[in-house]
Image (tube, rainbow, N blue to C red):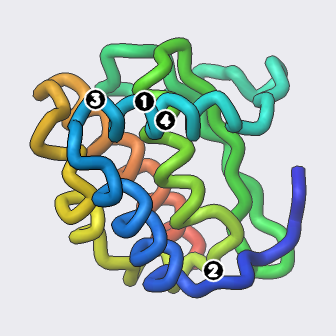
C-alpha cells in the first residue's frame, strides 16, 4: 500500500472529478469512465477479503481495508461488479490518504454534480451510501479515540 498523502486537497479532487464527469454529455460515457476508474483499483490482497472488511448493504460483494499510517487513513478495496468498482475508485480518489478530520468534514455534494447519482439504481445508491458510511465511521472512530 502506498502511504503518500495526496497532493491536492479534497475540494480540488472533487472539482477535478466534476470536470471530468461533466465533460461527458451522454450518461453511458460517464458509466464507461466510471468502469475504467474501477479497473485501475489497486489489487486487494485476499487476506483482507474478510467478513470484517465486507460492506453490508451492497448487492455486490465489496471489501474495504483501511489502515492508519502517520495520522492518515489509507484504503484498498475490491468489488466483484464493474460499476461498483468504479464507485469505490471514485470514493478512494476523494478519501484515500486523508486525515480522519478531513474525511469526517468532506462535503459529498460533488456526487450529485458529476451526474451519476441520478442514473444509479436504488440498490447501487444504497451500496454507495454504505461504502461512504463505512469510511466515515472509521474516521469517526479515530477522532473519538
Q: In the shown orientation, is residue 91 left or right of residue 9?
A: left
Name which of mark 1 and mark 4 comes first in the sequence. 1
The quarter of the image holding the C terminus is: bottom right
- How far apart are the two marked residues, 1 and 3, measured between alpha carbons? 6 Å
Name which of mark 4 and mark 3 comes first in the sequence. 3
Q: Are marks 1 and 4 in contact (CB under 8 Å)?
A: no
* Residue at 55% from the left image edge and 65% from the top image edge: 95
In this view, the mark in front (4 or 2): 4
Q: Are marks 4 and 3 in contact (CB under 8 Å)?
A: no
In this view, the mark in front (2 or 3): 3
In this view, the mark in front (1 or 2): 1
In this view, the mark in front (1 or 4): 1
The picture places residue 59, in percent across and down from the top left corner, at 32, 15
Q: In this figure, which residue is indicated by the disc labeled 4? A: 86
In this view, the mark in front (4 or 3): 3
Q: In this figure, which residue is indicated by the disc labeled 3? A: 28
Q: In this figure, which residue is indicated by the disc labeled 2? A: 99
Please tell me which residue lies in front, 4 or 49: 4
Instruction: Count up the numbered dots.
Output: 4
Please tell me which residue lies in front, 136 or 120: 120
- How far apart are the two marked residues, 1 and 2, measured between alpha carbons? 30 Å
Q: How many C-alpha atoms fall within 10 Å of the one at disc 1: few (<14), some, or many (≥20)?
A: some
* Residue at 77% from the left image edge and 37% from the top image edge: 42
The picture places residue 35, in percent across and down from the top left corner, at 49, 29
- How far apart are the two marked residues, 4 and 3, measured between alpha carbons? 14 Å
- The answer to which quarter of the image holds residue 130 is top left
Q: In this figure, which residue is indicated by the disc labeled 1? A: 32
Q: In the shown orientation, is residue 126 left or right of residue 139?
A: left
- How far apart are the two marked residues, 4 and 2, measured between alpha carbons? 23 Å
Amino acid at each position: 500500500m502506498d502511504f503518500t498523502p495526496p497532493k491536492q486537497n479534497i475540494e480540488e479532487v472533487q472539482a477535478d472529478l466534476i470536470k471530468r464527469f461533466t465533460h461527458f454529455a451522454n450518461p453511458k460515457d460517464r458509466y464507461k469512465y466510471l468502469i475504467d476508474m474501477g479497473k485501475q483499483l489497486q489489487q486487494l490482497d485476499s487476506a483482507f477479503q474478510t467478513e470484517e472488511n465486507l460492506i453490508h448493504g451492497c448487492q455486490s460483494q465489496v471489501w474495504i481495508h483501511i489502515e492508519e499510517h502517520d495520522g492518515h487513513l489509507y484504503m484498498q478495496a475490491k468489488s466483484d461488479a464493474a460499476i461498483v468498482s468504479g464507485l469505490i475508485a471514485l470514493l478512494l480518489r476523494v478519501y484515500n490518504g486523508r486525515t480522519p478530520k478531513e474525511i469526517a468534514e468532506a462535503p459529498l455534494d460533488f456526487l450529485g454534480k458529476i451526474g451519476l447519482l441520478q442514473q444509479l439504481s436504488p440498490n447501487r445508491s444504497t451500496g454507495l451510501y454504505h461504502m461512504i458510511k463505512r469510511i466515515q465511521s472509521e474516521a469517526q472512530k479515530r477522532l473519538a479515540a
